[in-house]
Image (cartoon, grey):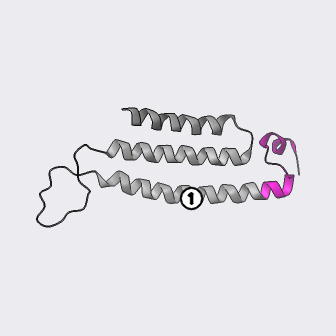
Amino acid sequence: MIVYLLCFALLLVGLYGVLTKRDLIKIILSLGILGYAVNLLLILFAYRNDSIYPILAKGKEVKQMVDPLPQALVLTSIVIELGTTAMLVALAIKLFEKYETFDITQIRRLKG
């Protein structure tokens, strides 16, 4: 139970960073933390006590297996998060080249 609470706390830290920070780099890092927390929650929900890996071998008796679907979803999510983070970093670099700041309040005020 404590692992779920710690993972939820990590999710709240990421959400806090996204909603309250003004620095674009901190927002991107907070989105990464938020994504990792969601992935961890998916894996934790799929975990079963006294289970084996979802790899079948001849001659082994299978009593209970860990669900492989959330593991595949998390792998897909990691790839999507990597692409999203790369796009956000490229956008932040372009914004810095144009406005010479990472502060989103100053970027909103500037026109042109």
Res. 90 image quadrant = bottom right
Name the residue nearer the viewer: 78 or 111: 78
* In the image, residue 108 above or below residue 56: above
Q: Main secondary structure of the magenta part?
A: helix
Residue type, numbered disc 1: Leu
Q: Is residue 111 magenta?
A: yes
Count all numbered tags in the image, as a single digit. 1
**Where is residue 106 drawn, in percent x and y?**
84, 42
Q: Residue at x 15, y 55 (%)?
A: 62
**Label 1 Cα neighbours within 10 Å, binned few <14 / some 14-19 / many ≥20:** few
**Where is residue 32 drawn, in percent x and y?**
58, 49
The residue labelled by disc 1 is 82
Q: Name the secondary structure under disc 1.
A: helix
Name the residue nearer the viewer: 56 or 3: 3
Q: Which residues are magenta?
A: 94-112
Res. 69 image quadrant = bottom left
* In the image, residue 103 above or below residue 93: above
Left or right: residue 49 versus residue 31 is left
Q: Residue at x 18, y 65 (%)?
A: 57
Q: Residue at x 81, y 54 (%)?
A: 96
